[in-house]
Image (tube, rainbow, N blue to C red):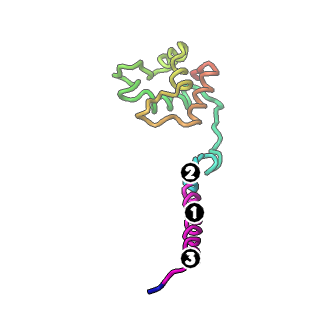
Amino acid sequence: MTIRTFKNISSHHQFLVGFGQVFFVFLVTAMLQGCYYDNEEELYGPGPACDTTANVYNGKIKLLIDTNCAISGCHGNGAANPLLTTYAQVKAKIDDGTFKNRVIDLKNMPPPSQSPLSACELQLISTWVAKGAPEN
């Protein structure tokens, strides 16, 4: 039978305490490594420049509205919501402020069930509305 002395127990205890401290530091460091916020521009750099020149309804804007708004079940033909299939219909909503309010200010159109507009698409629409929403 081996009799442990106080010196042996003390060194064993010191080893366990030291190991516990190292393990704790490692664990905290590993957990903090996983806590960060991805920023697309920081990861991939700025995207291509958003060209807002020659921004008229019959150019880029009609395509954006046809693709994201004037679709079946939303603002397309046969929908219960206000139609946005012609320039006159879109311009009426711009003139009364609802288009800018919903698309640019609140950003709740398109609805959450659809893909949101990109930053460039929002900039195109915002610039177009600010210029008075020209048709051609």
Q: Within the image, what quadrant is residue 114 found in?
A: top left
Q: Does the CB distance between marks 2 and 1 fall below 8 Å?
A: no
Find residue 87 and report its horizontal and vertical position in percent. 50, 20
Residue 60 left/right relative to 110: right
Which mark's residue is nearer the viewer, 2 or 1?
1
Residue 75 is a magenta residue: no
Decide which of tag 3 and tag 1 comes sooner along the chain.
3
Q: Quadrant of the C terminus?
A: top right
Q: Which residue is at the far bottom?
A: 1
Say which mark, if any, is on residue 35: 2
Amino acid type assigned to the residue bearing label 2 in the image: Cys
Amino acid type assigned to the residue bearing label 1 in the image: Phe
Q: Does the CB distance between marks 3 and 1 fall below 8 Å?
A: no
Find residue 118 and report its horizontal and vertical position in percent. 54, 37
Amino acid type assigned to the residue bearing label 3 in the image: Phe
Using the image as rendered, state which of residue 41 and residue 123 is in the foreground. Answer: 41
Q: CA distance from mark 3 to mark 1?
A: 30 Å
Which span is picked out in magenta? 3-31
Identify the residue under disc 3. 6
